[in-house]
Image (tube, helix red, strand yellow):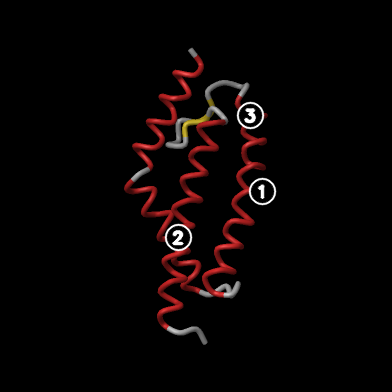
Amino acid sequence: MLWPDTQILSVAVMFLSGAAVALFYDLCRVAAGTDPRGGGQRGRSGRPAQGFWDIVFWVIVTPVVFAATLVSNRGELRLHVLLGLAAGAAAYLVLARPVVVRAGLAVRRGAAK
């Protein structure tokens, strides 16, 4: 059994990890030429790029979340770990996603010109 302070630290680390994963997901979508807000593909050329960015996303996210779980609670997968990840992703989606996606799409449009 983990001590309460260890569980709180674990939830905090997983919260930050969840927010980072959601941020990285949006950045990968913008890099692939897809509007993460549900705008869909911006032409047929985005499909191969999307597959590439999906692989990049999982290759980077999997070890990062695994390492965060190892550091925060010795790799034990418990309910508070999953809730922390979900809460972090939800907080990012509600609080920061509109700004990040708008800025990312503006940068992409500017780089394309």
Residue drawn 42% across the image and 36% down it: 37
Residue 63, horizontal then vertical, whole percent: 64, 56
Residue tagged 3: 47
Camera-nearest residue between 70 and 106: 70
Residue drawn 39% across the image and 30% down it: 103
- Alpha carbons under labels 1 and 3: distance apart: 19 Å
Above or below, 36 against 89 in this view is above
Q: Amino acid at mark 3?
A: Arg
Mark 3 vs mark 2: which is more N-terminal?
3
In-image side of 91 versus 111 (left or right) = left
Quadrant of the rendered image containing residue 109: top left
| Element type at mark 3 | helix
Camera-nearest residue between 23 and 86: 23
Label 1 crowding class (10 Å Cα cut-off): few <14, some 14-19, many 20+? few
Q: Amino acid at mark 2?
A: Ala
Query: Residue furthest toward the front?
Result: 71
Residue tagged 2: 86
Mark 1 vs mark 3: which is more N-terminal?
3
Q: Nearer the viewer, mark 1 or mark 2?
A: 1
| Element type at mark 2 | helix
Residue drawn 54% across the image and 27% down it: 33
Query: Residue furthest toward the left?
Result: 95
- Alpha carbons under labels 3 and 2: distance apart: 28 Å
Residue 59 circle label: 1
Quadrant of the rendered image containing residue 51: top right
Residue drawn 34% across the image and 37% down it: 99
Q: Amino acid at mark 1?
A: Val
In-image side of 107 versus 31 (left or right) = left
Label 3 crowding class (10 Å Cα cut-off): few <14, some 14-19, many 20+? some
Number of numbered discs overlaid on the protein picture:
3
